[in-house]
Image (cartoon, rainbow, N blue to C red):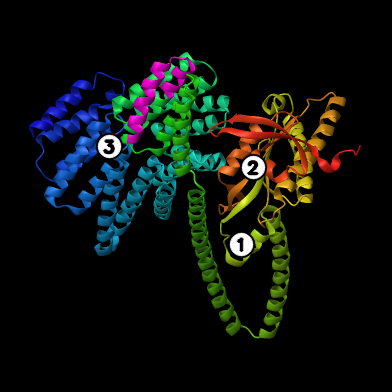
Amino acid sequence: MKNLVLILILVQCTAKQSFSQKQVNEKSDSLFSVLLTSKEDTSKLNTLNSLVRELRYSNHDTAYYFAKEALALAEKLNHEMKIADSKVTIGALLADMGRCDEGVKNATDALDIYKNLYQTSPEADKKILLRKLGRSYGIIGHNRIAQGNYPEGLKNTLLALKIVEELGDKEGIATYEWNLSNIYVTQHNYPEALKHLSVCLKLSLESGIKNDIAQTYDAIGFVYIEQRKYDEALKYYSTALKLAEEGQDAYTLAETYINLGTIKEKQGNLSEALKYNFAALSRYLEIGFHQQVSLAYNQIGSIYNRQKKYPEASEYFTKGLAQAKESNNLEYTKLTYENWALLDSAQGNYKKSLEHYKLAIAYRDSLQNEGNTKKMVQQQMQYDFDKKEATTKSEQEKKDAITLKELQKQKLMRNGFVGGFSVVLLFAGVFFTQRNKIKKGKKRSDELLLNILPEEVAEELKAKGSAEAKQFNDVTVMFTDFKNFTRISEKLSPAELVSEIHSCFKAFDDIITKNNIEKIKTIGDSYMCAGGLPVANKTNATDVVSAALEIQQFMRQHLQQRKNEDKEPFEIRIGVHTGPVVAGIVGVKKFAYDIWGDTVNIASRMESSSEAGKINISGSTYELVKDKFKCDHRGKIQAKNKGEIDMYFVEQSFSDRVPP
């Protein structure tokens, strides 16, 4: 009791010392007062848990202290449900502290208790226990995501999401959709991340909780940072910052500060970037979010490195690595080694730089290996398929009920009226009319499906109701985008812009179809396609490079035409890389055939490292096409997050050369 009083006094005294701790407000003060006079019963247990909820985002370490107190009291009272509740809460707090293995253990213990209680509880209590089971899965997933174990994180988060969707729990849905977005951001699958965050934003706006809305705006802003759309990101951060300040949400303020620091650094404003990152670090330390402290150390060290303040950079990378390893966070450990490699290189210590770079690659491979990618895709597809099956079953049950009712009605009519033969004729007419309509509808739906999915995948989907994700070892991926597209688009009307993109992409569609290449998707002005799937072949590298040359030629003619018409010119960059991918369909609405893996990321880097009007291919693609195309070696070029990669500009096909 003496220790508890001391903690309470300490918290109340420090409540006035920082912005974040001002969250220890009147409600917390009243809970402290109740706690000091409470008996060792469930009432005190409830008060302790209320304090944990109040303090989690304002005084994390103190929240953890009270959570442990709650667990000890629950065990003393031998209250199984409360023991499990406390363990789940502790699991969530440990994730934020970076102690993820402990977090998983506590949440798993709670899961086992809830499962046992669910088996023996009356029907009235099962809905409550089901919700708690969902939270346990969610906390396990949260810890695994924080560790960088994305397949396990995805699996448990989807289990949690399935439960809360069945319960119609909007708050739970928003939480787990948020967690899913975090996974897809780390995998650079930004459309999927934004899809999940749009669900979060809709539910947060419906709830009207400012802190939830602020955190969602902050997360969306981060996705736009990753896509280098800084102006778009700043719009979301402006809203997030305002809402976080209004709600006195120290955690979201810290997150917003660190992301604003990232934007300022990328824009070259290093002094402002440093200011924001130190503000974020201060908040994280105050509220005890140790997991994010490592990121802040890394950000600060990176800025010092760019300012050529090498001792300061080394100091913060040392702190960042220690915190990342203490938290067992693979993502931040990888980040620190990447930053240290850059620091060593800047100081001319190339041997040490290579050592750190190799360590970074090792951690990266453990985070983003092909096995993990395939496992995640299969988990997501299985979840989507199960969800679709449940929806289909529910709809069929409704149809069956309507049909049964109609049959009963027809039976009454048959018994009540003479002239059944005419009814039979009428029914037959309706039947054949409906059958013809169904036949036409099926033909139309098949045509639409083949326009969206490859024929092999569409047939599998129709036959089985799902299409299994597949591994392809040799696929050639091509990305294109238009140089200065944002600037040009501001000068065109929306109708003219859409017409221009449609004209180009239609020509690209015709070219790749002729060359046996599968269109994957378009994102804004970016066009993505791949050869060697859904049916594997040995000619995909040649096919894709041939198509790239045709696209290059089309765009040269198109460019000249626009210049002749005194219109803004569109110049294209093309990037190509060959390697392994996982391919499959995602979602249950608006099916999309997509591909995943490091090959896709490197192909994207080939495009961004290209030049206007040029076709930039990687060393792996070059080795497959060097006998068929004339290529100029550019040397080893630095690609973002990929290190140095051999790159070549494709000049022409040998078959196009004029003989001497």
Of the image marks 3 and 1, the number of the one nearer the N terminus: 3
* Farthest-out residue, right: 660
Crowding at mark 3 (Cα within 10 Å: few <14, some 14-19, many 20+) = some
Q: Which residue is drawn at 90% across and 39% down?
A: 659
Disc 3: which residue: 53
Q: Which residue is drawn at 57% across and 24% down?
A: 231
Disc 2: which residue: 620
Along the line of sight, the residue nearer the viewer: 351 or 52: 351
Classify residue 648 by image quadrant.
top right
Classify residue 481 by image quadrant.
top right
Q: Is residue 534 magenta?
A: no
- The overriding secondary structure of the stretch rendered in magenta is helix
Q: In the picture, which quadrant includes the N terminus?
A: top left
Q: Which residue is drawn at 32% across and 53% down?
A: 133
Report the side of 561 relative to 363 (left or right). Answer: right
Of the image marks 2 and 1, the number of the one nearer the N terminus: 1
Q: What residue type is labelled 2?
A: Ser
- The numbered mark at residue 155 is none
Of the image marks 3 and 2, the number of the one nearer the N terminus: 3
Disc 1: which residue: 461
Across and down, in percent, residue 326 comes to 31, 35
Q: Answer above or below: position of 491 versus 632.
A: above
Report the side of 171 relative to 80 (left or right). Answer: right
The segment highlighted magenta reads 299-325
The local secondary structure at tag 1 comes to helix
Q: Which amino acid does label 3 sit on?
A: Arg
Across and down, in percent, residue 342 comes to 48, 25
Does residue 113 appear anywhere in the picture?
A: yes
Across and down, in percent, residue 538 comes to 70, 54
